[in-house]
Amino acid sequence: MIIKKFRLSGTEQIQGYSIANLISEDAQDWYEAQSLFEKDKLKFEFDENGIITRFSYDVSMLWPIGKSVADISKNLVPDGLSDNGEWMFDGEKIIPAPIDYVSLAESKKQILMSAATATIDPLEDASGLGIATKEEAELLVEWKKYRVLLNRVDTSKAPDIEWPEKPQ
């Protein structure tokens, strides 16, 4: 069972409570559609890219605004399933989402560059003030070299990147 693209269709007042209604692209009401799902199957929400954003055996735990909903037999649920963006629905089964190695490498590079700069700044301060110890002056050179090498890392080659070694 797959019901696609739920959107907010309005709200109504019931016994003093404001109740939001969702409707699918084929005009199915969310509250009515819940009864169409089999109780013993895993129900899950997925976005327009197929990325699974929430799942439960209890369909009422889902709120698929802007999402689609499908179900799958227990024996087809992959080990390690999570709703952290690492899994997707291909229209038939749940599969691992493709990994964007370039984005991961760019994030790692930015984190390492920030850490290097945070280490270099006080060493540069000491050097600029003429109060750096011999050890601090040597560390400053090592960390600057590391930061330059890190800046040269070509993240488009991910995941096959040789990262420079951080100074000790």
Image: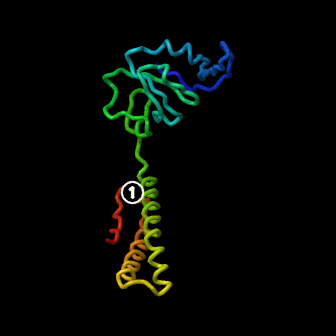
Give the SS element for disc 1. Answer: loop
Residue 124: x and y in percent read 47, 79
Name the spot of residue 87 as percent of width and height, x first.
41, 36
Q: Residues within 10 Å of mark 1 (few under 14, many from 20)?
A: some
Q: Quadrant of residue 31?
A: top right
Quarter of the image where one finds residue 93: top left
- Please report the residue visible at 66 percent of the width from the left and 22 percent of the height from the top: 9
Answer left or right for 66 relative to 80: right
On the image, the x and y values in percent for residue 122 come to 46, 75
Identify the residue at horizontal 45%, vertical 26% (top origin): 44
Color theme of the render? rainbow
For this orientation, the residue located farthest to the front is: 131
Three-letter amino acid code of the residue under disc 1: Ala
Residue bearing the label numbered 1 = 158
Q: Residue visible at 50% across and 24% down? A: 62
Vertical relation: 111 (above or below) 166: above
